[in-house]
Image (cartoon, rainbow, N blue to C red):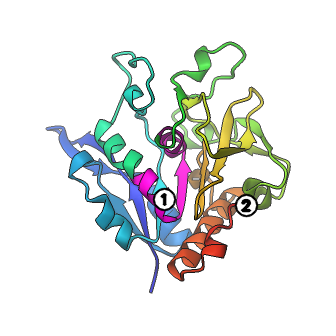
Amino acid sequence: MKSLIGISCCQKSFGRFAMLNHAVSDTYVRAVGDLMEAVPVLIPANGPQADLACLLSRLDGILLTGSPSNVEPAQYGGPPHPEETPEDRYRDGVTIPLIRMAVEQGVPLLGICRGLQEMNVALGGTLHQRLQDLPGRIDHSTPMQPLAAIRHAKAHSLRVVPGSWLHRVAQSREIAVNSLHNQGIDQLAPGLVAEGVAPDGTIEAFRVANATGFAVAVQWHPEYDMERDPVSRRIFLSFADAVLAYRRGDQARAFAAD
């Protein structure tokens, strides 16, 4: 029997009448279904209506996805966003408590882009809202190019912490990553350990050191080039190994990120 992997959705409006939908990019579904050979289970962004305990009792892992929306600043005591900034409070209402429960119960977690930011906030950290406005920081935001190959191309290098989970996955002290985010880590949450740092000092990968299971996050998007990039591929395969170990009750292997 295959593992069940929950994938966080966003609230989005579609169609002529802007009907509300719960949506996620196909890249995440393919990462779970094709590469990890598990069953993708979409988690609606339905805020307080979500039965998180029921979800966690059935899932073998959780993939926290990227999104154009930003984490609502009230979640970490930050100033309000500019009016035009996209938010998704109903997604926050699901993912923030879900992260805390998953870490407590040892359910394997992989956060990507917004997912990294959510994990940091859920566990007590804070965010910069626009890295490009900070002195000495590079512009990490999405290149406004119509060609996906350009938007998703490697944008900067990343220094990998020796001996870390990411070091084992990357098999290198330095890797190249894409960059499609405005928000970034300000204060790293207690209990989180940095695993990869951009040239401007932005933390772009971490693990939850005190978790009872696999709980890691990356700021870039490995799902965009998982078919051709070995590091991106191994990120998902490492998650898959932890999910399988958790499902089998092998906590030692499920904790392989440490």
Q: Is residue 136 above or below residue 209?
A: above
Name the residue tied to disc 1: 104
Residue 108 in the magenta stretch? The answer is: yes
Q: Is residue 157 above or below residue 170?
A: above
Name the kind of residue labelled 1 in the image.
Glu
Q: Nearer the viewer, residue 44 or 124?
A: 124
SS category of the residue bearing label 1: helix
Q: What span is in magenta?
A: 98-121
Q: Quadrant of residue 85?
A: top left
Residue 57 in the magenta stretch? The answer is: no
Q: Quadrant of residue 171?
A: bottom right
Name the kind of residue labelled 2 in the image.
Pro
Measured in 3D between alpha carbons, the distance from the residue under mark 2 to the one under mark 1, in whole angstroms, is 31 Å
* Sequence-earlier tag: 2 or 1: 1
Q: Residues within 10 Å of mark 2 (few under 14, many from 20)?
A: some
Estimate the x, y position of residue 29 in percent, counting from the top left.
Answer: 44, 62
Q: Is residue 187 above or below residue 213?
A: above
Q: Residues within 10 Å of mark 1 (few under 14, many from 20)?
A: few
Q: Is residue 25 above or below residue 84?
A: below
In the displayed orientation, state which residue is furthest to the left: 17
Residue at 55%, 56% (x, y): give it. 110
Query: How many numbered marks have been drawn onto this rendered protein structure?
Result: 2
Estimate the x, y position of residue 70 in percent, counting from the top left.
Answer: 43, 32
Q: Nearer the viewer, residue 71 or 178?
A: 71
Residue at 35%, 19% (x, y): give it. 84
Name the residue tied to disc 2: 230
SS category of the residue bearing label 2: helix
Q: Nearer the viewer, residue 32 or 211?
A: 211
Q: Nearer the viewer, mark 2 or mark 1?
A: 1
Estimate the x, y position of residue 165 in percent, counting from the top left.
Answer: 73, 57
